[in-house]
Image (tube, helix red, strand yellow):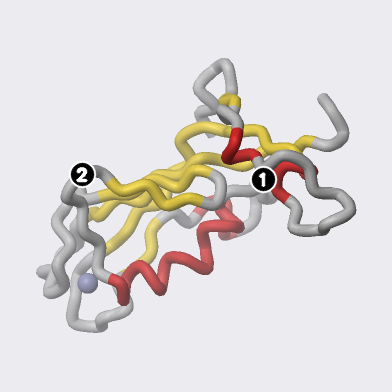
Amino acid sequence: MDKDTFWLYDLKVEVVGSEKPMVCNHQVGDYFLVEGENLVFGADQRFPMYSLASILPLLPAKQRDTDPHDWMTTDTEVACPDPHCGGRFRITRTGRRIFSHAETTGLPDQRGVPYWAKEPSTDSNGGEA
Ligand SMILES: [Zn+2]
């Protein structure tokens, strides 16, 4: 592997139910994807900003390899920040994508052509984590 490259997992964040009813506008099965720095929503897909705000800090860690004993590896569900809401959000690693440091860094003396100006490559085996 080129020493300039690194892998990030693609993620799926999906609304799952719990024993409590949901009070926010999440519906079981609603989801968005995380591909590199991008959040990818389907057509007409909505996601409440309060729950999104609680999920966002976890996503960069979930994108990276973590120790098998680390809770960040094993714990996949996040609760809605509204204590009255039963919304839960399952974060799943769905594949891997390779990036180049030069294509992603903001350091002016190390910056190449941005990755988003090219087609990203994905793991040949689908990258199931
Ligand atoms: Zn909620």
Circle 1 or circle 2, nearest the eye: 2
Q: Amino acid at mark 2?
A: Ala
> Is 88 placed above or below 28 here?
below
Q: Quadrant of ligand 1?
A: bottom left
**Label 2 secondary element:** loop
Instruction: Tell me the residue at 25%/44% (across/down).
Output: 42
Instruction: Tell me the residue at 44%/54% (across/down).
Output: 76
Residue 94 appears in view:
yes
Q: Amino acid at mark 1?
A: Asp
Image x and y of residue 128, in percent = 51, 29
Q: How many marks?
A: 2
**Label 1 secondary element:** loop
Circle 1 residues within 10 Å: few <14, some 14–19, many ≥20: few
Of 98 and 87, the residue lying toward us = 98
Instruction: Tell me the residue at 32%/71% (across/down).
Output: 51
Image x and y of residue 17, in percent = 19, 57
**Circle 1 residue:** 65
Of 23 and 86, the residue lying toward us = 23
Of 97 and 70, the residue lying toward us = 97
Q: Quadrant of the N terminus?
A: top right
**Circle 2 residue:** 43
